[in-house]
Image (spheres, helix red, strand yellow):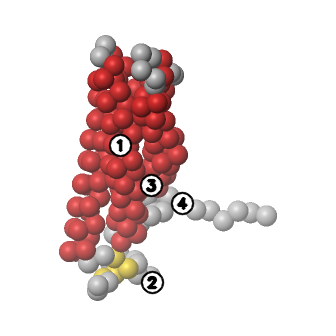
Amino acid sequence: MAVTTSAGAPNRSRPQLPPRARKVVLTVHVIASVAWIGATLCLLALSLTGLLSRDPQVQRAAYVALGTIVTVVGAPVSIAALVSGIMISVGTRWGLFRHWWVLVSLVATAVMTAAVLFALGPLMRGAAADALAAPPGTPVLDAVGDAAVSAVVAPCVALVALSAITALNVFKPRGRVRFRASRA
């Protein structure tokens, strides 16, 4: 892969992705980001179904699907969005630490990815396991417990955060990061 340099920096040049590679990475990033929002919407729909349905079989199926979606879709697309976002920022004129919006987007995406991997994933898989383990005749919501409400709240919070990150990346507010040397 050939590397081009950025224009505008008189004494130093930064390597950039060639146009075709940048478009490929950007395409992966957009697909992963949209899939992440879609998976989050699915989690919300399923968690609401599990909470509000009166049919125990529908409840059980909804909670089992939550565990599957967060593992098979949510985790991989969140990681793909984070990694491709880093690649785009490092390989383009925006840079990783040059603009506030890129830095805030990176930190927020990293926090959201960690939340999917270490909080949302275990919550949804736990709800799925509890729903499956419920003895016959036990209401599924009793088996799932407080996770039923958390399973609704978490995707709502995630949708707000992902929407904010998306807006930040679309509007790209001005402002460069200024690192100052500390004075001793």
- Label 4, label 1: how many angstroms apart (C-alpha)? 43 Å
- Label 3, label 1: how many angstroms apart (C-alpha)? 27 Å
Q: Is residue 34 left or right of residue 164?
A: left
Residue that mark 1 sits on: 68
Residue that mark 4 sits on: 178
Q: Quadrant of the C terminus?
A: bottom right
**Residue 11 x, y percent position in the rendering:** 45, 83
- Label 3, label 4: how many angstroms apart (C-alpha)? 17 Å
Residue at x 22%, y 61% (from the top left corner)? 27
Residue 141 seen by the camera: no
Residue at x 36%, y 71% (from the top left corner)? 91
Looking at the rendered structure, which numbered label has been put on residue 158?
none
Amino acid type at circle 4 is Arg
Q: Are marks 2 and 4 in contact (CB under 8 Å)?
A: no
Residue at x 33%, y 43% (from the top left corner)? 69
Looking at the rendered structure, which numbered label has been put on residue 11?
2
The residue most toward the top is 54
Residue at x 26%, y 47% (from the top left corner)? 34
Q: Which comes before the other along the chain, label 2 or label 3?
A: 2
Q: Is residue 183 left or right of residue 79?
A: right
Amino acid type at circle 1 is Thr
Q: Under tag 1, what secondary structure?
A: helix
* 2 or 3: mark nearer the eye: 3
Q: Which comes before the other along the chain, label 4 or label 1?
A: 1
Amino acid type at circle 2 is Asn
Amino acid type at circle 3 is Leu
- Label 1, label 2: how many angstroms apart (C-alpha)? 52 Å
Looking at the rendered structure, which numbered label has been put on residue 106?
3
